Image: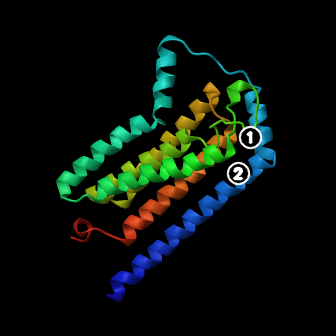
């Protein structure tokens, strides 16, 4: 029993450490935003740059890339993947993990958005506690968390090798960075919104994976 439990506990500790470090990074980013630190100066510099306007096909493409950060788009994808795996392996674990990810995203990210109330950059004013919902970026958090859970479920149940797992992780990172880049181009978020959102979403993703690894379902054990 010890040979099975001890490695699992070690994995859990490593994952919790990673999640804690990522969340600490997020809290430090939040502190910088609250104290008008160096990231805020980067925000203002980027906001003063020229932001192009898109039309026609270019507008359609840029909006579809931006939509990858929407909960509706990633959520539908997660439902499809989760239900397919649930039926294929006769376990509700993928659906439960998906629900856990959505609850964590909405409760944690939503709470910080409401508490900080930061205004959007396109208004030309960077004000906290003004009823805004800019920090942290839900697009960035959603892109790394929900698409990360989708990639993890495929990796976990399809028995993909480590190389395939690294490719899946790289794909999620590329997708999240694409969403963030588009948000900067369209001037819908401050840079620190996106950076903080990525850190918070990553912390939640690692925590959810740790929970799944530490408490495996019967289908995973067999």
- Residue tagged by mark 1? 128
Helix, strand or loop at mark 2: helix
Residue 146, horizontal then vertical, whole percent? 43, 47
In the image, 16 versus 99, the foreground residue is: 99
Please give the label number shown on residue 139: none
Residue 55, horizontal then vertical, whole percent? 54, 12
Residue 149, horizontal then vertical, whole percent? 40, 52
Q: Name the front one of labels 1 and 2.
A: 1
In the image, 171 versus 208, the foreground residue is: 208
- Residue tagged by mark 2? 30
Depicted 109 relative to depicted 48: above or below: below
Contact flag, marks 1 and 2 (Cβ < 8 Å): no
Dot 1 or dot 2, earlier in sequence: 2
Q: Which residue shows up at 69% across the image and 34% down it?
A: 119
Residue 106, horizontal then vertical, whole percent? 49, 47
Depicted 48 relative to depicted 77: above or below: above
Quadrant of the rendering where the N terminus is positioned: bottom left
Q: Crowding at label 1, few (<14), some or many (≥20) Cα neighbours within 10 Å?
A: some
Depicted 49 relative to depicted 158: above or below: above
Helix, strand or loop at mark 1: loop
Q: Is the image coloured rainbow, by chain, by secondary structure, or in one colour?
A: rainbow
Kindly indicate the quadrant of the structure image that contains residue 24.
Answer: bottom right
Horizontal placement of 101 versus 218: left or right? right
Q: Crowding at label 2, few (<14), some or many (≥20) Cα neighbours within 10 Å?
A: many
Q: Which residue shows up at 42% across the image and 45% down it?
A: 147
Q: Which residue shows up at 81% across the image and 49% down it?
A: 35
Horizontal placement of 211 versus 114: left or right? left
């Amino acid at each position: 029993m010890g040979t099975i439990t001890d490695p699992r506990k070690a994995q859990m500790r490593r994952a919790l450490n990673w999640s804690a470090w990522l969340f600490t990074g997020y809290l430090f980013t939040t502190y910088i935003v609250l104290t008008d630190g160096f990231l805020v100066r980067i925000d203002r510099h980027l906001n003063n740059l020229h932001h192009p306007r898109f039309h026609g096909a270019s507008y359609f493409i840029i909006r579809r890339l931006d939509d990858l950060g929407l909960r509706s788009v990633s959520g539908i994808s997660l439902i499809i993947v989760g239900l397919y795996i649930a039926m294929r392996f006769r376990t509700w674990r993928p659906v439960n993990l998906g629900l856990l990810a959505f609850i964590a995203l909405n409760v944690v990210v939503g709470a910080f958005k409401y508490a900080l109330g930061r205004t959007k950059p396109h208004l030309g004013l960077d004000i906290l506690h003004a009823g805004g919902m800019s920090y942290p970026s839900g697009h960035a958090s959603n892109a790394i968390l929900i698409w990360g859970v989708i990639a993890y479920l495929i990796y976990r149940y399809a028995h993909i090798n480590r190389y395939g797992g690294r490719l899946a992780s790289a794909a999620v990172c590329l997708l999240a960075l694409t969403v963030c880049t588009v948000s900067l181009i369209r001037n819908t978020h401050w840079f620190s919104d996106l950076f903080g959102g990525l850190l918070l979403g990553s912390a939640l993703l690692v925590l959810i994976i740790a929970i799944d690894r530490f408490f495996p379902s019967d289908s995973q054990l067999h």
